[in-house]
Image (spheres, rainbow, N blue to C red):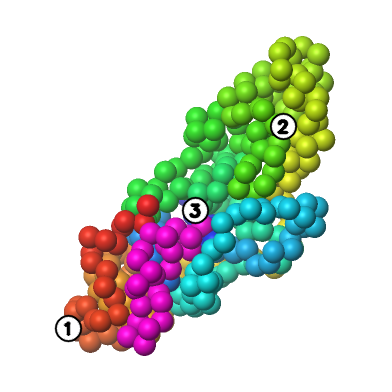
């Protein structure tokens, strides 16, 4: 049986948690913790559900990646994220450290590129790879060895997509995703594509011709206004296609093999939960270790919690019923 590698889109998980959990969640000292709580909760569910042999989390680091250098207005126009999201990022990294999960970032590359690089590396080394993300740019990585898991209800009901699943969802194959974005554009990244070519037209063109190059090679065969639109925005189409292509050879100094079966020390997670006053998660962690064989193996060592430590404190106002509602 192949080893399972879980690659986490850290930015996606943070944004899901920030917008799903009330921003009033804080410690007794007033430190806001809703993003950290949500990410920690999803991590527990992922471990319980996926039983991975290794996990790596990837993050965006800077606003001047190689794509920004090619396109000044790349991602311009996105709604500004509130400051109280950014102030929690160091704590999220501490959370991953408590779970002994390595984090990867590089100011020259986006998290998508880093995930794509590690996914391809993992697949070549024989790992079963699962990419946890909601970012459609990463759909282009799906193949026989790499699946996409889109979180729903925290991570209680993930939507798994292999190559066929991506085609069913987008109408194009994973390898056609950059070509599709070249035609249709991507408003979230401020990539216009071909003005007037929408998802249905883009899908139809790629079903018939296969690639963006082939679409333009058969331009004379294309009828109606689509032909003139394609002619007018040829340069934009190829530029947006190239911008949408993930880098899969980014420089990452991380060897996957030593991560297999590494796990973490139970007390490090308990200490972090205690510091953040995550009483609900602390109780949940204790029950998971008691009842789940994988969690007992992954979280090794002795518990530092008192035997009767199941009560909730003042910092953690979440109820058990609220935990999966991160959709």
Q: Nearer the viewer, mark 3 or mark 2?
A: 2
Q: Residues within 10 Å of mark 1 (few under 14, many from 20)?
A: few
Give the mark, 1 or 2, whose residue is nearer the N terminus: 2
Answer whether residue 21 is magenta in the image. Answer: yes
Q: Residue 195: x percent and y percent?
A: 70, 31
Circle 2 — which element? loop
Q: Secondary structure at mark 1?
A: loop
Residue 55 visible, this orientation: no
Front residue (pair 273, 204):
204
**Label 3 packing within 10 angstroms: few (<14), some (14-19), many (20+):** many
Relative to 192, is 218 on the left or the right? right
Circles 1, 2 touching at the beta carbon (< 8 Å)? no
Q: In terms of sequence position, does the residue under pointer 3 or pointer 1 come before the other?
A: 3
Q: What numbered label is drawn on residue 194?
A: 2
Range drawn in magenta: 12-35
Residue that label 1 marks = 308
Queried whether the magenta region covers residue 128, the answer comes back as no
Q: Residue at x 29, y 76 (%)?
A: 316
Distance from disc 3 to disc 2, alpha carbons, whole Å, reads 30 Å
How far across and down, in percent of the image, does residue 274 sit? 34, 83
Q: Does the CB distance between marks 3 and 2 fall below 8 Å?
A: no
């Amino acid at each position: 049986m192949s080893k399972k590698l879980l690659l986490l889109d850290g930015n996606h998980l943070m944004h899901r948690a920030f917008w799903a959990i009330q921003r009033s969640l804080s410690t007794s000292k007033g430190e806001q913790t809703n993003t950290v709580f949500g990410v920690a909760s999803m991590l527990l569910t992922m471990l319980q559900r996926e039983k991975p042999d290794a996990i790596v989390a990837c993050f965006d680091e800077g606003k001047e990646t190689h794509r920004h250098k090619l396109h000044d207005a790349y991602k311009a126009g996105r709604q500004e994220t509130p400051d109280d999201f950014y102030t929690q990022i160091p704590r999220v990294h501490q959370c991953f450290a408590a779970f002994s999960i390595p984090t990867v970032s590089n100011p020259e590359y986006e998290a998508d590129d880093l995930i794509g690089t590690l996914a391809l590396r993992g697949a070549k080394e024989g790992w079963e790879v699962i990419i946890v993300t909601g970012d459609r740019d990463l759909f282009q990585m799906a193949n026989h060895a790499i699946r996409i898991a889109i979180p729903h209800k925290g991570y209680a009901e993930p939507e798994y997509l292999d190559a066929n699943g991506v085609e069913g969802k987008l109408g194009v194959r994973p390898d056609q995703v950059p070509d599709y974005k070249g035609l249709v554009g991507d408003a979230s990244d401020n990539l216009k594509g071909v003005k007037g070519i929408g998802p249905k037209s883009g899908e139809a063109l790629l079903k018939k011709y296969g690639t963006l190059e082939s679409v333009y090679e058969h331009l004379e065969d294309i009828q109606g206004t689509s032909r003139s639109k394609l002619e007018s925005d040829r340069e934009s189409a190829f530029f947006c296609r190239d911008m949408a292509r993930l880098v899969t050879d980014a420089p990452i100094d991380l060897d996957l093999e030593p991560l297999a079966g590494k796990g973490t020390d139970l007390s490090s997670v308990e200490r972090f939960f205690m510091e953040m006053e995550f009483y609900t998660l602390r109780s949940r962690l204790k029950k998971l270790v008691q009842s789940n064989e994988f969690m007992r193996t992954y979280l090794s060592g002795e518990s530092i919690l008192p035997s009767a430590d199941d009560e909730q404190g003042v910092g953690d106002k979440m109820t058990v019923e609220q935990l999966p509602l991160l959709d």
